[in-house]
Amino acid sequence: SQTIHQWPATLVQPVGSPLSLECTVEGTSNPNLYWYRQAAGRGLQLLFYSVGIGQISSEVPQNLSASRPQDRQFILSSKKLLLSDSGFYLCAWSARQMTSGSVYNEQFFGPGTRLTVL
Amino acid sequence: RKEVEQDPGPFNVPEGATVAFNCTYSNSASQSFFWYRQDCRKEPKLLMSVYSSGNEDGRFTAQLNRASQYISLLIRDSKLSDSATYLCVVNRAGTYKYIFGTGTRLKVLA
């Protein structure tokens, strides 16, 4: 069965410090990978997604970046955190999607990292 | 207008009640539809996919109305453990992106 791991679970960082969050998926190959952020009391905001090694699509221009150095590894980074970066960061995966036909590719989430920037 | 819209609630219902949520989507090219459940301070978890013909899983029934562009979730015989936020999710055909509604909060009261 597939599992998705994220670490750390919680993080408290000062403004201006760097960030690195890691996500790994087990039990599947060639997954689509996603980073979302959920601010307190708000919906999920898609930050980045990747359909393959080294391929990153950015949804929201900001001081965050993502990388996919291996097939099942997805990293979210920042050089200098802002107060507004606080939130619940979620990594997710889905099976590689076909572009036609009726395919239900559910998305599965990791346990998340709760980031507080002070 | 948001691409996926949900009534934020909260819906406060007594145990044993039947409750229904609707979710509307604006992009007719949307292909796949899902309901997720999110508990407080936890990750969203897949509740069920929504098939064109509708589908049922125990006390939960999901329906899709493509003509009116909405999906629904019906929960029968509500349990205290059903208290959570229910997220409507839409996947547009030919894309790798999933669009999330902001969620409907359900509180089941003893």
Image (cartoon, coloured by chain):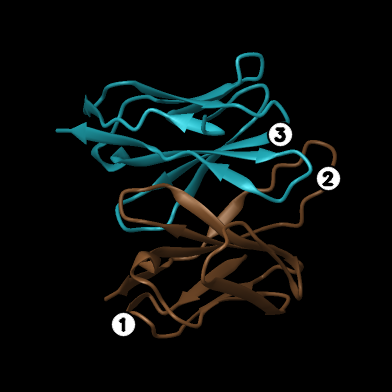
Please, which chain is the residue tagged with disc 2 on?
Answer: A
Distance (Cα) linking label 2 and label 1:
43 Å
Mark 3 belongs to chain: B
Q: Residues within 10 Å of mark 3 (few under 14, many from 20)?
A: many
In percent of the image, x 28 and y 40: which residue is there? B83
Other residues around mark 1 within 10 Å, as few (<14) / some (14–19) / many (≥20)? few
Kind of residue indicated by mark 2: Thr
Q: From this viewpoint, which residue is outermost toward the bottom?
A: A17
Q: Quadrant of residue A2?
A: bottom right
Asked if residue A54 is positioned above or below residue A32 in the image, the reply reads below
Q: Which chain is cyan?
A: B
Which of the numbered marks, if any, corresponds to residue B31?
Answer: 3
Q: What number is the disc on residue A14?
A: 1
The quarter of the picture where the C terminus of chain B appears is top left
Chain letter corresponding to the colour brown: A
Residue A102 placement: quadrant: top right
Amino acid type assigned to the residue bearing label 1 in the image? Pro
Q: Earlier in the sequence, mark 2 or mark 1?
A: 1
Q: Are marks 2 and 1 on the same chain?
A: yes
Mark 3–mark 2 contact, CB under 8 Å? no
Mark 3 near mark 1, Cβ–Cβ under 8 Å? no
> What is the quadrant of residue A47 in the picture?
bottom right
Q: Which residue is mark 2?
A: A99
Numbered tag placed on residue B23 in the rendering: none
